Amino acid sequence: MKKTVLFCISFIALVFPGCGGSPGESLPLITPTIYYKPVIDKSKDKCESNDLRDMIDEDGKVLISLCQKSYDNCQLQGSCFVIDGDKTRAFNFTKRKAGISRFAEKHEDRCPYGYGVRAICLDPFYSIAADMSFYQPGDVIYVPKLVGVVLPDGSKHNGYLVVRDEGGAIIGENRFDFFTGFYGPYDKDNVFAQIGFGDKDRQFGYERVDENIAKRIREYRNYPNIP
């Protein structure tokens, strides 16, 4: 992959408008999708008993039972919160064992939005899942389209994202899944969805940044934790 010709870096803002490849340089194109952290209210998760699925851990212990649709979404997104009575419980997909998906119940004190690979905290709007055949945790990419995008907390995106996760359907060097916290792909307030990052038919230029810049970005985002 081509290295970035020029990156402007600031310890305060980390990126200035116009940073990235030199004028006229063509960039590789992302095929994007969005994933998020579903919140399932057990009291409203109603279905017939034959439509219930047990969420089990690696030892075969039943952690909780959910309706098929909720179970499938939790598995697809890789994690979910379940409001269970007066408790909010957090579950993460871990692996498939004996042909069955396995989960772990997590305590979210360190990682309130859930975990990526190697127990790395997911950082909303700044995390991506990538194909680990081409990337490793901590790699950083720069997406010019995201520079200046106003996030739900009112801050503006600097265009940099850190690889913190992987996914079974995330295959290929230019294929990325963008993590958007509690905002799903059809949420009207999901700013990434608004600009097309939930649509695999849309493509956006990106560059993989050099390690000296990646190191500063990881420090800025408090990797492997979150700010």
Image (spheres, rainbow, N blue to C red):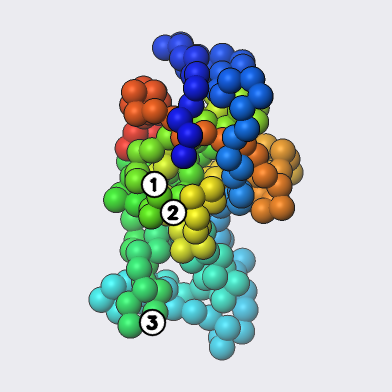
Image marks 2 and 1: residues in contact by CB distance under 8 Å: yes
Give the spatial CA distance, label 3 vs label 1.
Answer: 27 Å
Q: Nearer the viewer, residue 13 or 140?
A: 140
Q: Which residue is mark 1?
A: 135
Q: Earlier in the sequence, mark 3 or mark 2?
A: 3
Above or below, comparing residue 214 to residue 123 in the picture: above
Q: Earlier in the sequence, mark 3 or mark 1?
A: 3
Q: Residue at x 58, y 20 (%)?
A: 22
Q: Amino acid at mark 2?
A: Asp
Mark toward the viewer: 3 or 1: 1
Mark toward the viewer: 3 or 2: 2
Above or below, comparing residue 47 to residue 145 in the picture: below
Image marks 3 and 2: residues in contact by CB distance under 8 Å: no
Give the spatial CA distance, label 3 vs label 2.
Answer: 22 Å
Q: Which residue is mark 2?
A: 131
Q: For mark 1, does the 10 Å Cα neighbourhood hold few (<14), some (14 to 19), or many (20 or more) residues? A: some
Per the image, label 1 sits on a secondary structure element best described as loop
Rendering coords of residue 104 (x, y %): 33, 63
Image marks 3 and 1: residues in contact by CB distance under 8 Å: no
Q: Looking at this view, name the residue that lies furthest to the left.
A: 59
Rendering coords of residue 209 (x, y %): 44, 30
Residue 64 can be seen in this image: yes
Label at residue 99: 3
Q: Amino acid at mark 3?
A: Gly
Image quadrant of residue 121? Answer: top left
> The C terminus lies in which quarter of the figure?
top left
Q: For mark 2, does the 10 Å Cα neighbourhood hold few (<14), some (14 to 19), or many (20 or more) residues? A: many
Give the spatial CA distance, label 2 vs label 1.
Answer: 6 Å
Q: Amino acid at mark 1?
A: Tyr
Per the image, label 3 sits on a secondary structure element best described as loop
Q: Looking at this view, name the residue that lies furthest to the bottom.
A: 50
Rendering coords of residue 187 (x, y %): 70, 47
